[in-house]
Amino acid sequence: MNTEEEPEVLWTISNINMVPVIVAAIIGLIFIALFVILRKRSSARRDFLLTGLSESGKSAIFMRLLHKKFPDTYVSVKENMGEYKSGGLAGRIIDIPGHYRVRNKCFDQYKRTAKGIIFVVDSVTIQKDIRDVADALYTILSDIATVPCSFLVLCSKQDLATAKSVKVLKQLLEKEMNLVRGTRGKLEVLGENETNKATYLGKNGKDFEFSHLPQNIQFYECSAKEDQLNHLTDWLDRML
């Protein structure tokens, strides 16, 4: 008895709908490109900038942190650099000079490689220096280049009896930075270039609060003299 054989089906490229394949390939390439870009940006930012006014104690913190020494006097006239290591990870600490004549220029040089910024405040002289401190901190926070950075406001010299607590210092800074913001207006300075472009800090119509900012800002107390830098080292370890 003759049986009919089923016709053999031949699959060719013309039989396959290539549109989903092409779309999937394009999406895959986009994800790979985004991953590479984000990885490069992340690796490009490995510095931690230690900044603040002159005599705030930041260079003493730098010496204690990296060299296990506490200098009697230490005035920075140029940036100091050192490697901070934790386990198998490492980051570069850059101590920015505090004098206003060189502070901004030096900060601009390194702000685009900064992964974190440590702003040191003298807890003893904060009320006397509040305007200068708030102005310097506001300048850094409003710089569009620092938006990706994590921030630590380090309240130094806590070994002294007249040092203000974190709570008091934060309240003083928020009040003063609200005044600085009012003075600067909308921060849209005529002729301002992209390199130093500023952004408005906080929420329109509301008093300034650190919680309103996109950056992750934390406040801790420390004493370089007493080697009480555990909050700083914990923060650095998390950032690496």
Image (tube, rainbow, N blue to C red):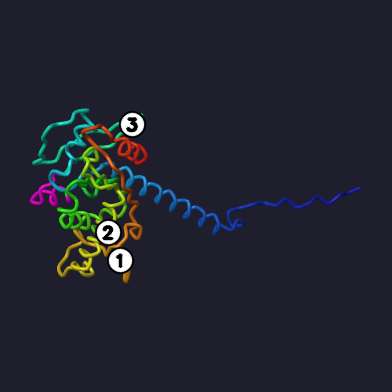
Q: Which mark is residue 51?
A: none
Q: Is residue 32 left or right of residue 221?
A: right
Give the answer, above or below, for where 180 lies relative to 125: below
**First-in-chain label (3 vs 1):** 3
- The kind of secondary structure element at disc 2 is helix
Identify which residue, 98 or 25, lies in the foreground: 98
Identify which residue, 213 or 33, lies in the foreground: 213
Q: Is residue 65 left or right of residue 212?
A: left
* Circle 3 residue: 86
Q: Which mark is residue 207?
A: 1
Q: CA distance from mark 3 to mark 1?
A: 39 Å
The amino acid beneath tag 1 is Asp
Mark 2 burial class by Cα count in 10 Å: few <14, some 14-19, many 20+: some
The amino acid beneath tag 3 is Ser
Residue at 35% in and 37% down:
234
Q: Are the residues flagged by discs 1 and 2 in contact, CB closer than 8 Å?
A: yes
Give the answer, above or below, for where 87 lies relative to 12: above
Task: Where is residue 104? Give x, y as percent.
Answer: 14, 52
Residue range in magenta is 97-108
